[in-house]
């Protein structure tokens, strides 16, 4: 096969920005800001996470790519090594995600210059490993050189290509590595040539959203056309049943006709991301509504209280409606990140505040829990209950965070999300700014500048200093969990009502107008839908956007976590010292059930020891040592 002709000048790209930037003709309600327009400050929680990512998580991923053989695979593909292929057959994707993270990070002031070397060296290696016709995949070059395109169910070739494309999009939008854009476009042109004429799809969606993004970057329409073709081909049984059936690959029903999410949760969510991207670029309202319908089904019946998706370990999949067991939750980290991506795309497409609510929930709970305080240890699955005496049954169900995995999709996925975190705070243009996520930051939108100071999510006070022209509107999200709020402008109470989830404030603005939004943050008892049988008779504790949990670490040594009962009638108090983490204190009791029979007709539990309980934010669990944890707490008086 000859190399396809280049589709155009790779430097002729569309502007800057961050991830998922709708094109100029897109039908989208909101416009994202560029990374250069939002600066997170290190004295806020999100800024601290981004700094930790830059200083610890991202360098750790770079080190592991070398130690685990991912880069060695590419050297073998370039003919520079005769070592055997190492790791999973889709190991290239971890290189691409780490590369994407490095490219976003290099857009930040004061970025580590060592990242520049990693980007340059890796880009050069990819160029050497790329075949003459544009094909680039180390596994099918080194381990199965005759297997190219022959195993669409399993191969992950298009999945890996998708992550390469997303790295190239980061390169193009940051103006950092034009050579990466060029080599990626050669591969993308090969995909257009190969797959525009055959009825095939990839077993793992990802290429759809990536091609749509490459179209947005370049304006080259065949990329968008192919993305749409992949979506429209899915659901016609092209992949066959496979080990877990067609639902596992979302190949059982066309996406436009699907009524419920199904199968492998990461694949489903990546497919939804692609559906939204294609819909807004083509003006396809039916496709957008299908994506919204599936998302609503997931959030309404299959999402954990932490925002996590996927309840089954066997196939990393969604379960039945309301099948949300806390101790058997799979809740893969990559699914949480994918949910954040889908929420962002739906927010841009519709402007509906509920999508920002879901982004906040999954980011501050499920995603945040997946990485340790040192930034170098990670969860693959994220249970909501780790039982006393739990025995690990494999690294994906580990009772503690691990530094790496044989299937290492999650750590570099965390790195790339955290590296571009500022891009998700706000949207805006010359007419106004919409603030969706609260963090200490400086934001520039059109002619306006907004400085945000807050100890959110620990406290609900958000202070903004606004410099803007007269005709300019500031929209501040009031989260759905917030039952009360107060607004002050230059120290004076200001009447304002919530409009579709936002307070919308229009000038006149002076030089440095001071706006204060105070969101009420009482501790809440959250109850699940009665059909969630696994937590019937239990409550979860929440404050603001954070879900809390009990850890064995905070209980007396002779108390078993599973015996603890919460007193639902006693006060629930938030306790913290100044700025920083806030814990929740509550009252409870713990009957000694050590000798209680496994089954009994006796509805009365033995006498119980009163307890003062301390609940910590779920995302912080497991940082003080290994041990049991639970989010859903049975109530005192419940049989």
Image: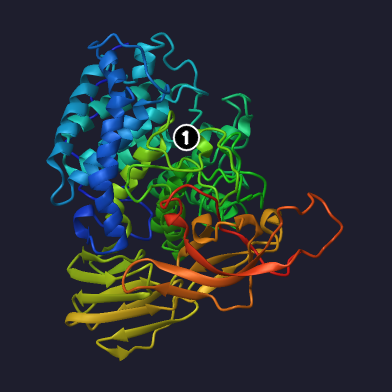
The residue closer to the viewer here, 328 or 558, is: 558
In this rendering, the answer to whether 270 lies above or below 204 is below
Q: Position of residue 449 (x, y in %)?
A: 19, 69
Q: Position of residue 536 (x, y in %)?
A: 70, 60
Quadrant, the C terminus: bottom right
Dot 1 falls on a residue whose secondary structure is loop
Residue at position x 12%, y 40% from top? 113
Quadrant, the N terminus: top left
Q: Where is residue 575 in the image (x, y as percent from the top left)?
A: 43, 73
Residue at position x 29%, y 68% from top? 433
The residue closer to the viewer here, 537 or 73, is: 537
Which quadrant of the figure has residue 636? bottom right
- Left or right of 502 in this view: 52: left
The residue furthest front is: 558
What residue is shown with label 1? 205
- Left or right of 234 in this view: 595: right
The residue closer to the viewer here, 193 or 84, is: 84
Residue 283 visible within the image: no
Which quadrant of the figure has residue 516? bottom left
């Amino acid at each position: 096969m000859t190399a396809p002709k280049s589709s155009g000048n790779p430097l002729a790209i569309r502007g800057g920005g961050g991830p998922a930037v709708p094109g100029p003709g897109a039908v989208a309600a909101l416009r994202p800001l560029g990374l250069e327009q939002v600066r997170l400050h290190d004295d806020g929680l999100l800024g601290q996470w981004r700094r930790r990512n830059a200083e610890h998580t991202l360098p750790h991923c770079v080190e592991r790519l070398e130690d685990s053989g991912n880069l060695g695979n590419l050297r073998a593909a370039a003919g520079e090594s005769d070592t055997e292929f190492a790791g999973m057959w889709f190991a290239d994707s971890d290189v691409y995600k780490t590369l994407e993270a490095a490219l976003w990070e290099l857009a930040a002031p004061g970025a580590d210059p060592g990242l520049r070397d990693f980007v340059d060296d890796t880009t050069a290696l990819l160029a050497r490993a790329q075949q003459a016709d544009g094909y680039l995949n180390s596994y099918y070059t080194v381990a199965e050189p005759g297997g190219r395109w022959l195993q669409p169910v399993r191969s992950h070739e298009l999945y890996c290509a998708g992550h390469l494309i997303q790295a190239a999009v980061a390169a193009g939008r940051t103006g950092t590595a034009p050579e990466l854009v060029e080599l990626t476009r050669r591969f993308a042109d090969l995909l257009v040539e190969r797959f525009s004429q055959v009825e095939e799809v990839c077993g793992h969606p990802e290429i759809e959203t990536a091609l749509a993004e490459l179209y947005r970057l370049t304006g080259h329409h065949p990329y968008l056309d192919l993305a749409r073709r992949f979506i429209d081909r899915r659901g016609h049984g092209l992949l066959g049943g496979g080990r877990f059936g067609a639902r596992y690959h979302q190949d059982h029903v066309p996406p436009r006709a699907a009524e419920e999410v199904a199968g492998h949760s990461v694949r489903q969510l990546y497919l939804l991301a692609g559906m939204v991207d294609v819909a807004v670029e083509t003006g396809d309202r039916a496709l957008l509504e299908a994506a919204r319908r599936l998302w609503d089904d997931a959030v309404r019946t299959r999402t954990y209280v932490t925002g996590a998706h996927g309840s089954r370990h066997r196939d990393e999949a969604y379960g039945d409606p309301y099948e949300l067991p806390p101790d058997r939750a799979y809740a893969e980290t990559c699914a949480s990140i994918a949910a954040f991506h889908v929420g962002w795309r739906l927010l841009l497409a519709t402007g509906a505040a509920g999508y920002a609510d879901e982004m906040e929930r999954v980011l501050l709970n499920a995603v945040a829990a997946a990485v340790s305080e040192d930034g170098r240890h990670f969860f693959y699955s994220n249970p909501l209950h780790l039982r006393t005496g739990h025995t690990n049954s494999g690294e994906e169900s580990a009772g503690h965070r691990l530094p790496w995995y044989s299937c290492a999709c999650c750590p570099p996925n965390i790195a790339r999300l955290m590296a571009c975190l500022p891009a998700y705070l706000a949207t805006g243009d010359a007419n106004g700014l919409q603030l969706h996520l609260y963090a200490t930051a400086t934001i520039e939108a059109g002619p306006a500048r907004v400085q945000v100071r807050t100890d959110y999510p620990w406290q609900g006070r958000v202070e903004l200093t606004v410099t803007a022209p007269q005709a300019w509107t500031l929209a501040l999200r009031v989260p759905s969990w917030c039952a009360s709020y107060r607004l002050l402008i230059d120290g004076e109470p200001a009447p304002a009502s919530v409009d579709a989830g936002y307070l919308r404030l229009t000038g006149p603005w002076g030089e440095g107008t001071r706006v204060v939004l105070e969101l009420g943050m009482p501790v809440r008892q959250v109850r699940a839908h009665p059909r969630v049988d696994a937590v019937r008779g239990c409550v979860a504790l929440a404050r603001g956007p954070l879900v809390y949990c009990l850890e064995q670490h905070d209980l007396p040594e002779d108390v078993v976590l599973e015996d603890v009962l919460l007193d639902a009638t006693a006060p629930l108090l938030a306790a913290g010292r100044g700025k920083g983490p806030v814990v929740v204190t509550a009252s409870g009791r713990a009957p000694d059930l050590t000798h209680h029979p496994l089954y009994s007709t006796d509805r009365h539990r033995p006498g119980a020891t009163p307890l003062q309980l301390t609940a910590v934010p779920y995302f912080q669990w497991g940082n003080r040592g290994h041990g049991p944890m639970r989010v859903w707490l049975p109530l005192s008086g419940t049989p």
